[in-house]
Image (cartoon, rainbow, N blue to C red):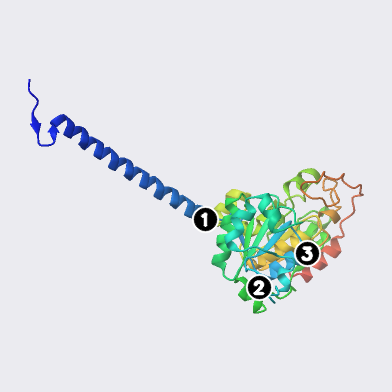
Amino acid sequence: MALINNAGGSVTSALLLTLLAWAVRWLRAELNRKRREEESGKQASRRTVGRFFGRLSPVALRMLVETGPYPHHIFTLRPSAPNDALPAELRGALRLPESRVAAVLGSEAAWGEAFQGVPFPKPHYLLVFVGNTEEEELRAAAAAASCGFQRSMVLEGGLQLLAAGGAQPQADLRFINRDALAVLLGMCAEAGVVHAPPAALIDVRRSDERALYGAIKGAAHIPVDQVPSALALPADQFLERYRFPKPAPDDLVIFSCRTNTRSGWAAQLAQDAGLQRCLVLRQGVYGWRLDPSVKPYRGYKLQDAPPEAEPFQVEPINVEAGRVELAQLGIPVM
């Protein structure tokens, strides 16, 4: 049987050519789609900051520099220039242009070349980025997150706010002593039934410290490096993650740590987030000594071997002193 021919050859050949052309167009479209998706994913990655991202006020930055409540590095994104003196709040900051953040944080070798003699940050370190604008800082934080650093912070207002004198020393932190807290928590049987306004006691130590040495009964837990990101969460997400209600602006919130350095910084962060009634346990759990299950211990770094708990004698609660102090703090008890 004779084949039906056309000007371009047989019908079979024409059909094959048509199918081939269609396949090429489909493949090209698929490649373009995947390229767009990959580029979109890269852009999204660049916009994604770490899980425990937060913003620092100039006052909280000054406290971080002066008291060192958590292992950290501070980076100024402004390139070095002649006679370019950094503000006091950036004492010891490392100069790292935004364009170099991913390269330097992504390689210990590149870090060593950029910052000779400065140890490469461990994954749990807090990285603070300070630039001319917050947008620049956010891009740097996202680059750090792409390198595995989930704890990053940016400075509200950037360098312009520091230059304008926005970082005044904090002066309004308030403390509470252990006897007053014990009365507030209803630990004193001889004081009878104590009716006091609700208060949230938040322990900002690491999980290993709480597990090894105990915690004050009733204390909730937010590690200090998570306080800024926690306070930025919606109430439902806060409750789901930390298992207690998110404090409202006028709630009484008491922070504790081993001494009072981390809890003092946490209280400042909370005040910056709008909480108006923050207190710091002055003696910390080291000086609690009202409960045999809460043991004093020497401070140690996460990577160090935990020290042995120190021996101590349980001490009595001074109920009268506690009541007097609560009255002075404006916390009514009956």
Residue drawn 75% across and 63% down? 264
Q: Amino acid at mark 2?
A: Ala
Instruction: Determine the CA span between mark 2 and mark 3.
Output: 29 Å
Labels 2 and 1: the sequence-earlier one: 1
Labels 2 and 3: the sequence-earlier one: 3
The quarter of the image holding the C terminus is bottom right
Q: Is residue 167 above or below residue 227?
A: below
Relative to residue 140, is residue 91 drawn left or right?
right
Residue lying farthest bottom?
Answer: 164
Give the label, 2 or 1, closer to the camera: 2
Whole-percent x, y for residue 33 in the image:
36, 47
Q: Nearer the viewer, residue 129 or 275?
A: 129
Labels 1 and 3: the sequence-earlier one: 1
| Residue 315 in view here | yes
Determine crowd level at label 2: few under 14, some 14-19, many 20+ residues with C-alpha closer than 10 A: few
Determine crowd level at label 1: few under 14, some 14-19, many 20+ residues with C-alpha closer than 10 A: some
Instruction: Determine the CA span between mark 1 and mark 3.
Output: 32 Å
Q: Amino acid at mark 1?
A: Arg
Relative to residue 311, is residue 110 drawn left or right?
left
Residue drawn 79% across and 50% down? 301
Q: Amino acid at mark 3?
A: Thr
Q: Secondary structure at mark 3?
A: helix
Whole-percent x, y for residue 255 in the image:
73, 59
Question: Label 2 belongs to which residue?
Answer: 81
Question: Label 3 belongs to which residue?
Answer: 67
Q: Is residue 172 above or below residue 313?
A: below
Quadrant of the image occupied by residue 65 = bottom right
Residue lying farthest top?
Answer: 1
Question: Label 1 belongs to which residue?
Answer: 46
Instruction: Determine the CA span between mark 2 and mark 1.
Output: 28 Å
Whole-percent x, y for residue 166 in the image:
66, 76
| Residue 334 in view here | no
